[in-house]
Image (cartoon, rainbow, N blue to C red):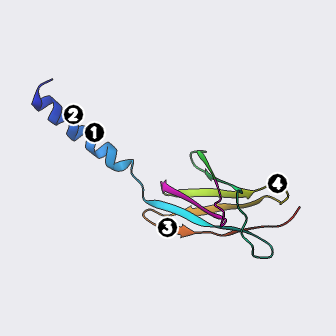
Amino acid sequence: MTSAARLTSGFLLFPLLLSAQFRAAIEGVVSDSSGGSVPAATVTLNNNETQRSQKVQTSSDGFYRFSGLPPGTYTLTAEKPGFRRQSMTSLRINAEEVQGQNLTLTPG
């Protein structure tokens, strides 16, 4: 491949790489009804438009974070054995924004 061909193909790929990088995020704390943190809870984030789903476990402090998100509408769910699942639907994630969303689990 000539240097001109490599340079041209690099310019063609550069916009694709830029469009695939998102800086939006959602983070928060999962707690119980008394305010204590819930470690090792499973938090699921589902993009309502693409149906792409991601899962994380909360830290020992109940903290979770999803980053690199494209703008859109999402459903956020937290669950752990011994608790009732909590879901929040129609969460709007805006471009370039970090959104805080805490969740509270009740025994059940």
User: Residue 13 shows which numbered tag?
Assistant: 1
Residue 77: percent from the left, percent from the top? 70, 57
Q: CA distance from mark 3 to mark 1?
A: 28 Å
Q: Quadrant of the C terminus?
A: bottom right
Q: Is residue 29 above or below residue 84?
A: below
Q: Three-letter amino acid code at disc 4?
A: Pro
Give the label, 3 or 1, closer to the camera. 3
The extreme right residue here reads 108
Q: CA distance from mark 4 to mark 3?
A: 29 Å
Residue named by callout 4:
81
Instruction: Give SS at disc 4.
Output: loop
Q: Quadrant of the N terminus?
A: top left
Q: Three-letter amino acid code at disc 1?
A: Leu
Instruction: Give SS at disc 2.
Output: helix
Residue named by callout 2:
9
Q: Earlier in the sequence, mark 3 or mark 2?
A: 2
Q: CA distance from mark 4 to mark 1?
A: 46 Å
Instruction: Give SS at disc 1.
Output: helix
Callouts 4 and 1 close, C-beta under 8 Å = no
In magenta stretch: residue 20 = no
In front here: 34 or 87? Answer: 34
Q: Three-letter amino acid code at disc 3?
A: Val
Q: Is residue 97 left or right of residue 76?
A: left
Give the label, 4 or 3, closer to the camera. 4
Give the label, 4 or 1, closer to the camera. 4
Residue named by callout 3:
98
Locate residue 99: give its quadrant: bottom right
Magenta range: 57-70
Q: CA distance from mark 3 to mark 2?
A: 34 Å
